[in-house]
Amino acid sequence: MDLLQAFYYVITPYPFLWLFVGVASGIFVGAVPGLGGGMLMALTVPLTFSMDSTHAILLLMGMHVGSVSGGLISATLLNMPGTPSALMTTFDAYPMAQKGKPERALTLAIGSSLVGGLISAVFLIGLAPPLSEWAHKFGPWEYFTMVLMALVLIASISQGSLIKGLVASTLGIMAAMPGLNQSDGQLRLTFGLEAMDGGFNLLPVLLGIFVMSQLIKDAVDIDKKPTIIGMKKRSLFPKISEWKQHAANLIRSSIIGTWVGILPGVGASISSMVSYGTAKTFSKRPEKFGTGHDEGIVASEAANNANAGGALIPLITMGIPGAPVDAILLGAMIMHQIQPGPLLFQTNGQLVWSLMAGYLIANLIMFLIMTLASRQIAKIVKINKAYLIPAVFVFCLIGAYALSNRLFDVWVVLGFGVIGYILDRARFPLGPFVIGFVLAGILEAELRSGLQLSDGSWTPIFTRPIALTFTLISIFFLSYALFNDFRSRRKKRTDTIN
Amino acid sequence: MSQKTNTPVLDLSLTGGFLVVAGLFLYAARDIPPPFFDPLGSAAVPQTTAWALVGLALAIGTRAVLALRAGQNPPRSAQASNRGSAPLLRGLSVIAISGVYLAIMQYSSLGYTWATLIYVSLLGSLLSKFEKLPTIGSIGLAVILSFGGNYLFTEFFYIDLPQ
């Protein structure tokens, strides 16, 4: 199957229906602050077990695209980002809405989201096949150093302290250690509990970290009632003439979003921050940023949507999740007996081309739904959390229980939910935890294979060019993060003295 | 990027927790047999990550102690003070009630349907502070999720829910 056939396939009734359902539900969930794409996807994975694997992945990917975009509605009308990636959108979209122009803010945000999504789709389609070919050259040492690089990258780039990012990665790796070791069949770290023989399953851990921790947070903050800005009945279709002045910003922000997305482990929030900062630097009116300025909205929304496409590239070609939410897509693929990586184009060509075609079409569906129904979607933003919290936990229970018909997995959801909440409260980023958990198995297996091939020697890390490049990138990012840490401490000390 | 800690008390408590976790891992890893067909074996990675956690936890702990000694524990905001401990209690009640819900299904004869009916009604009412309308709504939702959910998930998704 090639790309053109994949487009034909995706627009046939069933695949299109699942994609549409995914995008629509993603937009709704993304629009409600406190819910998110990760939550929706993790809850949906168990319901897809009986589905065709391509339909299931299209549904989940549609949810991802929809939720990234849905976050802009609450960011614009409530000053609360529906998803973390919409944070930068609040800086300009909400002030613009407050000035009586919510429709204009939404038009700019939705249009930019579409352009960001389409540009990243072009990169996805253009880069994934050659990258996959290149990844055929990878041996165990290349995989080991690449996974290490992904962990270092996410720990050093994620928001907050570098040490906290590293702790979160380490904890994620440790959580994946108990149970049967796939490399040699050795049982380890089960603490005498029979239920731990299989270790912690991916889905309950994801449900705990993404969903349960958020439910606890929502219960704590349930008194915070947002005020929503009303909208008039005006068209949200953008005028082409208006977009000409934003062309450079749109293209630049989309490229930034895509490339940040390609970096393994780095999420959409970072994309929109980098792109917002760059747009401000290049702007002729930087002082206007944060006051309801067009350029800020365009930069943030084009980048966070482009990130979703960029993040699919390492996932498809190397089996490395480009962002924490992509870890769920990776988990869903594994549960459907699909192994992402360089061989995916050969083993599951239909799925991978459909995924790429589906991503492009999902962006178009997102644009249509949001342009036509934003006014209606805005009404559900104020949904009562007292209904949501118990209902979502019941879905967590069903999802985790369905995995292997045991309540132990639901206890795991609750336990990791509490851990996630405490870590979040202490400002430990949760992304590195999830990525660490997902990649720990690959990290250990590849290291053991590599050492077996080299008779216990670590020198291939330095003698194999690709492995050496990944190692140097890891060292560079770690050193850069440490240098930044040192610089910010010194600056704060100087400020205090002055 | 990297900043000074803003949560020194919590960081210090977590340092203790991390050290306990690392200690447990190192203790349990002693029982893993030595490598028999590859140079690394099954104990090396858990042990290395546990030692890495010890190092990182000590770094966080040291930073937290320094911040506390410098008087950096940020005072609670006026808004947070006014809210008191109610939000935290609400969070704890969600965890506790959810735990009891699971324990009931695991250790008593109450299956998914009745346990869910009680759980959703109780938690929904509690979160809406027993206001009349949301409480009625929660009970309605509980009926749908318990009886409707049981029918939907067992008959259509073939999930064998706890009975």
Image: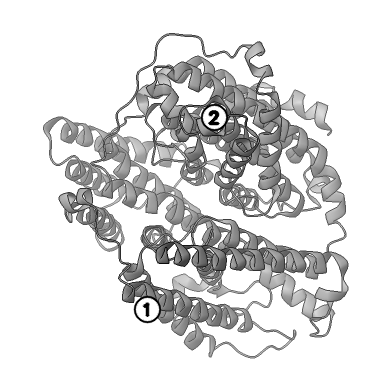
Badge 2: residue crowd in 10 Å (few <14, some 14–19, many ≥20): many
Q: Is residue A383 left or right of residue A246?
A: left
Q: Amino acid at mark 2?
A: Ile
Is residue B23 visible in the rendered image? The answer is yes
Compared with residue A50, is residue A337 higher up or lower down, i.e. above or below? below
Residue located beneath label 2 in the image:
A297
Q: Nearer the viewer, residue A7 or B78?
A: B78
Badge 1: residue crowd in 10 Å (few <14, some 14–19, many ≥20): some
Disc 2, SS: helix
Residue located beneath label 1 in the image:
B16
Percent position (x, y) of residue A248? Answer: 71, 28
Query: At 51% across and 76% down in the image, what residue appears?
Result: B56
Q: Nearer the viewer, residue A471 or A366?
A: A471
Subunit bearing disc 1: B
Asked if both marks, 2 and 1, belong to the same chain, the answer given is no
Q: Is the residue under label 1 in contact with that under label 2 (CB below 8 Å)?
A: no
Specify the quadrant of the image occupied by residue A62: top right
Percent position (x, y) of residue A85? Answer: 52, 41
Disc 1, SS: helix
